[in-house]
Amino acid sequence: MHDPFEESLRDLLQSSVLAHDDNAALGRVLKTANRQAGAGDLFALLGHWFEALMIGLNNGSPHIMPVSRRGTLDSSADKAD
């Protein structure tokens, strides 16, 4: 399965092979991976927060409707049989 995230990390690791500094190359790859994974987690958190907000608004909306304290006028009760 093609994973663009993995491909970009692999390319970053292979492009820094010319420098022959494995620790620096690994550090750059891990730093990039942490940034990308952190951004994905942040967007997932915001998505779940938004979904929870929408569920709360949907469940709470009937409680916001105005309620009349006046009883319904039953016109049939005023009529004689």
Image: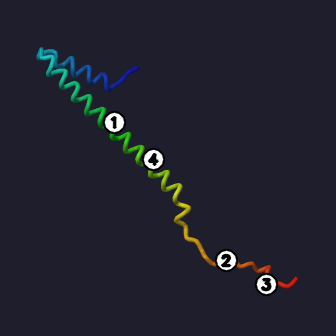
Residue that carries the numbered disc 1 in the rendered image? 40
Residue 75 coordinates in the image, percent (x, y) = 76, 80
Q: Is residue 40 above or below residue 24?
A: below
Question: Which residue lies at the image location 54% right of the left edge and 63% below the top edge?
Answer: 63
Residue that carries the numbered disc 2 in the rendered image? 71
Q: How is the image coloured?
A: rainbow
Amino acid type, mark 2:
Gly
Badge 2 marks a residue whose secondary structure is loop
Residue that carries the numbered disc 3 in the rendered image? 78
Label 2 vs label 1, nearer the camera: 2
Badge 1 marks a residue whose secondary structure is helix
- Which one is earlier in the sequence, the residue at label 4 or at label 1? 1
- Which one is earlier in the sequence, the residue at label 2 or at label 4? 4
Badge 4 marks a residue whose secondary structure is helix
Instruction: Give the quadrant of residue 21.
Output: top left
Compared across the picture, whether 61 is left or right of 48 comes to: right
Residue that carries the numbered disc 4 in the rendered image? 51
Classify mark 3: residues with Cα within 10 Å, few (<14), some (14-19) or many (20+).
few
Classify mark 1: residues with Cα within 10 Å, few (<14), some (14-19) or many (20+).
few
Label 2 and label 1: CA atoms lie apart by 54 Å
- Which one is earlier in the sequence, the residue at label 3 or at label 4? 4
